[in-house]
Image (tube, coloured by chain):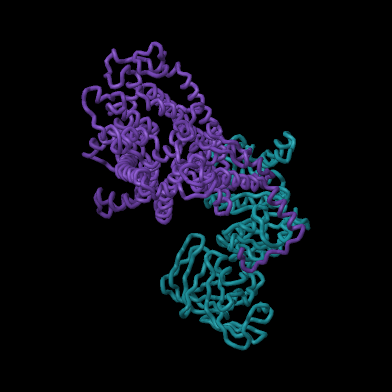
Chain colours: A purple, B cyan
Amino acid sequence: MAKKGWKRPPMTKERLKNQVLNVIGNPFNMIVFFTLIILFALIIIPLLSMVQNTFIVAKAELRSIPGAKIGDYTLYYWRYLLASPLTKTILWEPLLHSLLIGFFVTVISVPLGALMAWLMVRTDIPAKGLLSALILIPYMIPSWCKALSWLSVFRNELSGSYGVLTGLGIPVPDWLAYGPFAIIIVMTMHYYAFAYIMVSGALRSINSELEEMGEIQGANKLQILKSITLPLVLPSILSATIMTISKSIGSYGVAARLGNTIKYYVLATRMKEFINDSPKGVGYAMSILMILLAAGTIIVNQRLIGTRKSYATIGGKGTRSNLIPLRGAKWPMLIVITVFLVAAMVLPTFFLVMESFQIVPGGGYGLDNLTLYAWIGELENAPNPAFAQNGLFRNSEFFRALGNTVKLSLIASIITAVFGQFFGYITTRGRGKWYGNAVEQLIFIPYLMPGVAFSAIYFAMFSQPRLGGLIPSLYGTFLLILLVSVVKHFPFASRSGSSNMMQISVELEEAATINGAGFWRRIGSIVIPLAKNGFLSGFLLSFISIAKELDLIAILMTPANYTLSFLSFDYSKEAMPQVADAICIVIIAFILITNRIADRFGGNVSKSM
Amino acid sequence: MSKIVLSHIDKFYGDNHVLRDINLTIEDGDFMTLLGPSGCGKTTTLRVVSGLEKPQHGTMTIDDRVIIDADKAFYEAPSKRGLNLVFQSYALWPHMTVFQNVAFGLKIKKMKKAEIEETVMRALKTMRIEEYRGRYPNELSGGQQQRVAIARAIASSPKLLLLDEPLSNLDARLRIDMRAELKRLHKETGTTIIYVTHDQVEALTMSTRIALFKEGEISQIDTPLGIYTNPIDLQAADFIGNPRINFIDAKGYYDGDTLRVTSEFGVYVYPHETVKTDEEIPVNTEFDCVLGLRPEMVDIFTEDPQHRNTVPATVYANQPAGSETLVTLTVGGVEFLAIQVGLVDYDMNQNVFVVLHPGRMNVYNKETGRLIKYAKTKHKAGVDD
């Protein structure tokens, strides 16, 4: 405290007593205190413990490291990863594949998303209402469901069962069915959403007067687009680019489904193999690399955008914006979007649904090949001996997974949403103060990590007893999966919480303070009633996200805890994909319905304020 | 009904020293206005009084009861200070009706239901909004919301009412209405009021006393008339009054008894009793000073009025505005503004005679910017001054 012209008064007994009372007597301070402890225990300690695990000899490697005892410090794992004959196969190749995929996904999906955003926000493209209702639906279909759908069309002999094309007698080469090409296409149909969401947000905030001014100066449409609109949305495009790279590099489900068959590995799939087999330490080391890679790109983004963000939100009074007439380009543009929607939404869903009714996958859609078996069949009456389990609605595994999914999503999203509101409260009320910044920074950490790497951290931390047995090994428990789901969704929930809290002006609370309301009274009578709708929509959105999660929990799964996503993923490895498809359809329906409800509450937030 | 004493209040935000040694006594029943441009610390002072901010140094008492003693880290809770606050944004709770908004604090005090009903309705009646009791804030106009905010603040019968720029979100007409309303409220309830504003008209029309803020310090505390007649420094003089005061460069000479000021208007000699002797004035040497001349103190004549303070002048520009006319005049190289009541028409470059009243002018030391000679108010000054 370098306050000029002011000396700290001498510490007297009374001053000390009052200071202590001031701190303790204010529940807010206590909440901040416990929040910091919780975040530290749930984020920092597991992270450090994983780092530590990469330097410590584990039981499985006792024989590989001569003379070592369990718990000795060692560079074995890092050397194994970075400087061994295997390095090329386990590190450089997967890394190259990840980067390649990240690069192409970004190069395709960012321009695609940005173009669609521009069309939807700034032009007079026909059927806008319908299109804007549909355009984000492909993103809601879990990416690995799209991978399953891709397989249902392009599978060849390698998979043990045929896809639609092979079934028709059209030979499908391996490079088309599996590997980078397929992964890039499927991910593009998913990650276009980042660019779409960010760019359309930026476009909406731009005052159309800026463009009209360009027109008055004599610029034509293309010049306006190039020298006014594009520079103004550039920060959002940059953001979307970085997000897309980071997400596609860290993604596990799609790469595993479409790559493992032909032994095409990326970092995420390689890492999971090491963690589920051994040496686990190498897997941990790889996940540290993944975190550095993902965190690095995001931090670069923050730096780059930080200084330029200022004009991304240039608003002004002109919310009414004049749409740009597309004229002759109207129909071609409409076709572009329609083709995209058909490819990313209609066809994947169609093939999943159809395949779920087939007796022999790839056997055509004739009546003789259709059955309800995958939905309601019993194993003894199976029309195809290759079916390995009952139809969905007679399958106890399905019901257990459904129960697990509902239990997990419900509990985890309630906890995340409640914590998110508290975090949001602390970060908005503590903006610019040390504790507000500290909470914000801590919460941001899980956001920097790919889901599969994040769960590796928890695996490292809790797959063995901790604190001298005080915390037993949590591997295989519901609690561990719950914990991971909650903490990984903290950044998201706290962002929704803080945007919610931002709408509740501090003065509303101060007015209550003046009228004699204490902290809890303020929370109860002012903050909660006003935060209700935002809380609900935040809750539903994390509910959806947890319900479809696969990457995050894949490492931690044991059969008793299978969720729908993982069950479907597991079934899809078998020769009979119909039941896996059916589960996908259930998940998609579930997501769309929940999203519809969330929309309703989201709409209320703006109306009620 | 209370007397508030703030002494040596210092407030920092980080390294930013926003309140510097604030000393202020507000007498029982005062309508004290904290006046100053934005960012000068007046709202912070109000928030310190309310308890929403804790100063790092200083004490505050209300009726001799210690409320703040920063050295002992003692800060009484806002709700135990017997005051209430009207926010600039009104801060009405959007999820509560007008009635619920006003009743909130009473409920916390565990007042009985019938009593709450009665108290709330009395407050609503005082602000003439009883018919809106069931409405939500977003169903009310700005002016009505303002009234609800005030009703909420007075419902608990506070001994001290704090108002933070309450009129700044209203349009010009409503502002005049609400000024009258607030003045009546002060008279009727007798409550001590602290009122924050950057609008000098509000300050001059409503207050019993004004504290003028400058960069985190109080530069002057006086009655509205006192502040208007004798602003303590050039900045205060420039800030108070609309249209602005005229500053005329001059040379001063002070022999320890009388002050002689020479300007384009001639030579004025001021007797010792009008000189502010506690200020820094160079003795027996010529120094730069500034004459402060209010536009309404200039009388314009087309014929020589045979007054001893007459100076010939030229009309530079003329702006009739209905109830008054603004006339820009030049005397030698000096340009200044005058106000005449009613519509008066002068031609450009017309030669006229102006009567100036040296006794009613302020004199400032140019180097320190401080007032060194008091002006007399019009009714105290003789015709000749």
Question: Would you place residue B72 above or below residue B298 in this image?
Answer: above
Residue B114, percent from left and from top: 73, 34
Residue B187, percent from left and from top: 70, 52
Residue for point 71% across, 48% down: B158
Total marks drawn? 0
Q: Is residue B148 left or right of residue A94?
A: right
Residue furthest front as drawn = A67
Q: Of B152 and A25, which appears nearest the observer?
A: A25
Residue for point 44% across, 26% down: A567
Residue for point 55% across, 60% down: B38
Q: Would you say residue A321 is visible in this rendering?
A: no
Residue furthest top as drawn = A381
Question: Would you place residue A538 above or below residue B66 in this image?
Answer: above
Question: Would you place residue B317 above or below residue A528 in this image?
Answer: below
Splitting the image into 4 quarters, where does residue A564 fall?
top left
Q: Of B215 and A520, which appears nearest the observer?
A: A520
Quarter that holds the N terminus of chain A: bottom right
Q: Is residue B199 left or right of residue A396?
A: right
Q: Would you say residue A539 is visible in this rendering?
A: yes
Q: Of A306 and A286, which appears nearest the observer?
A: A286
Residue A73, percent from left and from top: 52, 50
Q: Of B323 and A400, which appears nearest the observer?
A: A400
Residue B67, percent from left and from top: 74, 55
